[in-house]
Image (tube, grey):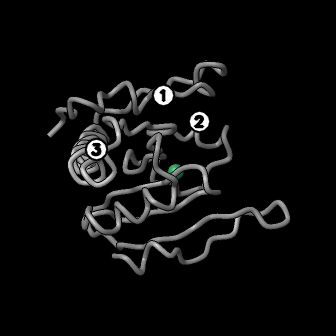
Amino acid sequence: MTQFAPNFPRHEFEASQTATRRGIDNTIPDDLLGDAAKLSWFLQELRNKINRIHRSETRARELPVIISSGYRCLELNKAIGGATKSQHSAAQAADISVPGMTSQELVEFIAKHMPNYDQLIEEFGRWVHVSIADKPRGSVLAARKVNGKTVYSPSRGRLIA
Ligand SMILES: [Zn+2]
């Protein structure tokens, strides 16, 4: 399956300001396109559910899911200081946000309504890292900076799942 979901086309996963500035080719390689497409359909289902469930509860306007970082080739991942075995480099993770929802609300929504996530990390109160995997772990963490270091702890979102 390499067809991407309508609201999450391939270029949204490849786009990176850092890659553009540094002349890094962040094209998703053919062997990772299947996972990238799966991730796009996961995000499509999430977007659909947010607009069906969250919107009917809050009467909000139609909400987009914005990808701030999708695929990262190894060179790009290194350039931005990503984790060594980042799922971004396997095209299995995206950092996302939804205008009008806090990152905590988004984590809780995914934990409650998207049973197949692999890992959710609420990062610095700003965005949510979400990944998929063949054998999903269903782990929920929060990342915070403590004395300049990133510290991960279990998130409240877990209680909702
Ligand atoms: Zn991430």
Query: On the rendered structure, is 91 left or right of 6?
Result: right
Tell me the amino acid under the disc marked 2. Leu
**Mark 1 touches mark 2? (CB < 8 Å):** yes
Q: Nearer the viewer, mark 3 or mark 1?
A: 3
Q: Quadrant of the N terminus?
A: top left
Q: Nearer the viewer, residue 72 or 49?
A: 49
Circle 1 residue: 26
Within 10 Å of the Cα at label 2, are there few (<14), some (14-19), or many (20+) other Cα atoms?
A: many
Q: Nearer the viewer, mark 2 or mark 3?
A: 3
Badge 2 element: helix
Circle 3 residue: 47
Q: Quadrant of the C terminus?
A: bottom left
Quadrant in which residue 130 is drawn: bottom left
Count of numbered badges drawn on the protein:
3
Furthest residue toward left: 1
Tell me the amino acid under the disc marked 3. Arg
Q: Earlier in the sequence, mark 1 or mark 2?
A: 1
Tell me the amino acid under the disc marked 1. Asn
x and y, in percent, of residue 156 in the image: 50, 76
Badge 1 element: loop
Residue 76, numbered label: 2
x and y, in percent, of residue 98 in the image: 44, 43
Q: Earlier in the sequence, mark 3 or mark 1?
A: 1
